[in-house]
Amino acid sequence: MIFKTILEPFRIKTVERIRLTTQEERETFLQEAHYNPFLLHSDQVIIDLLTDSGTSAMSSEQWAGIMRGDESYAGASSWLRMEKAVQELTGCPYILPTHQGRAAEHLLYSRIGGAGKVFISNTHFDTTRANIEFTGATAVDIPIAENRDPALFTPIQGKPGHGALKEKIALYGAENIAAVILTVTNNSGGGQPVSMENARHTAEICRQHKILFILDACRIAENAWFIRHREPGLEHKTYRKIAQEMFALADGCIMSAKKDALVNMGGFLALRDLDLAVLCRTVLIVTEGFSTYGGLSGRDMEAIAIGLEEVFEPDYLNYRIKSTAYLADKLHALGIPIMRPAGGHAVYVDARAFYPDIPLDQYPGQVMACELYRLGGIRCCEIGSVMFGKYDAGGQLIPATMDLVRLAIPRRVYTQSHIDYVAEVFGELTKHRSNKKGLKIVYEPPFLRHFTARFELV
Ligand code: F0G
């Protein structure tokens, strides 16, 4: 008998209180936060779906590891444990620990980037793009066409279009391409998985043209779940084996451990090439710390080593992916336009389709994020024209390709009743859909404006 209930495969040993605010209180908090959920205080939030990054609940084994953490400056046993765990998973001999993913990006991209260099990806995550552009290099996204349409139902997505990859190589010249970066799963493109077939093709093209091939692997375990359940021929392999096969295709990887290593802080860069590793290690020592701890405490490294094992447990991954799909299915049944099928770590709602009457320069995604907070205390993040919009010469908004709202699910944190509550709030949202007012920006910084921009109701 296979039961339908998605059973959380853990018991709860420690609890963290959630303050249940009233709608009246939240309206005040929202005004005080200038209609930007990033500016809310966490105790004003009931369900926090802002990010799945660094928000995981650690296991009792990880907490036990925290006590074992060896805080020696050099050669700590916790480092050796983390190094071995990462080597075994990625197959890369050279491991550089960092305090989080973007630090690992900085180590590598500051070395191989620079003016005239081009990076190509299925979609660069925003810190990836920022690290690349900061060096004067160019970051080019080539997602498959389907990724641009939030309503499209395709079995496996997130791959760079291979015709497009060859075209870009011809356009820029292989010698000018610093790296091809495959982001698995494709966070900015809807959290969609990348197939093994695609990773293999990408690797082949890179090898032919002698281009460095890097995996942005922070959600590689979730990606492996999709491959095993959707890609023919791989259904008999373990999730870990699938991940190892994908790592084996690349010259190295960057991982924010704050996602699929189930920890609150950490990351690493893993490389096959000694010369490149030595180059990056110099930056590591200057900016992060000595090469056997990077920006991490011994206890962090201990928790990463354990998390990298736990994340591949079949019961965990099943629960993880199915509970995200559970929310997606509930929202779909309510008629909420979402990207389907759901990705692994988040559900992406198409706010532009939900609020067709709100002009794009009044930020329908931001409106939805604020409404979800106002009605139900749910915090989430706009991924649309606030985050990616630009201005033309006349100061008119050039909107992003899509106006999405991301409901990112922290790992092992919320139960099914929390998720049911989120769906119920969406039910309320549909009742308050018409005559919704848009928002205008009254303050914005020059760079990464979504974190600190201030808004007013139009
Ligand atoms: N790459 C991807 C695909 C990411 O999603 C992130 C972070 C990073 C790199 C950078 O890692 O935060 O440890 O420095 N994503 C978070 C998010 C912030 O909310 O999606 P980091």
Image (cartoon, rainbow, N blue to C red):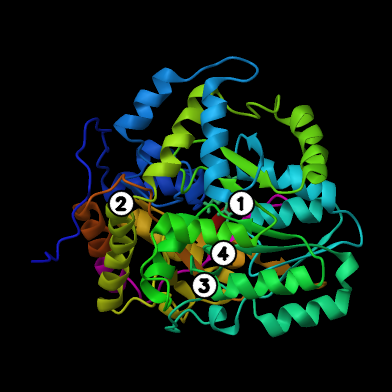
User: Foreground: 324 or 289?
Assistant: 289
Q: Residue at x 54, y 68 (%)?
A: 363
The percent coordinates of residue 77 (x first, y second) are 53, 21
Which amino acid type is marked by label 4? Ser
Residue tagged 4: 188
Of the residues under marks 2 and 3, which one precedes in the sequence? 3
Marks 1,2: beta carbons within 8 A: no
Real-space Cα separation, disc 4 to disc 2, in angstroms: 24 Å
Q: Which mark's residue is nearer the viewer, 4 or 2? A: 2
Of the residues under marks 4 and 3, which one precedes in the sequence? 4
Which amino acid type is marked by label 3? Ser
Is residue 154 at least partly visible in the picture? yes
Q: Residue at x 24, y 52 (%)?
A: 418
Specify the quadrant that holds the N terminus. bottom left
Real-space Cα separation, disc 1 to disc 3, in angstroms: 37 Å
Q: Is 142 contained in the magenta span?
A: no
Q: Is mark 4 within 8 Å of ligand 1?
A: yes
Residue tagged 1: 453
Q: Which residues are magenta?
A: 426-452
Real-space Cα separation, disc 4 to disc 3, in angstroms: 17 Å
Residue tagged 2: 316
Marks 2,3: beta carbons within 8 A: no
Of the residues under marks 1 and 2, which one precedes in the sequence? 2
Q: Which mark's residue is nearer the viewer, 4 or 3? A: 3
In the rendered image, the vertical position of residue 171 relative to residue 416, given as above or below: below
Residue tagged 3: 195
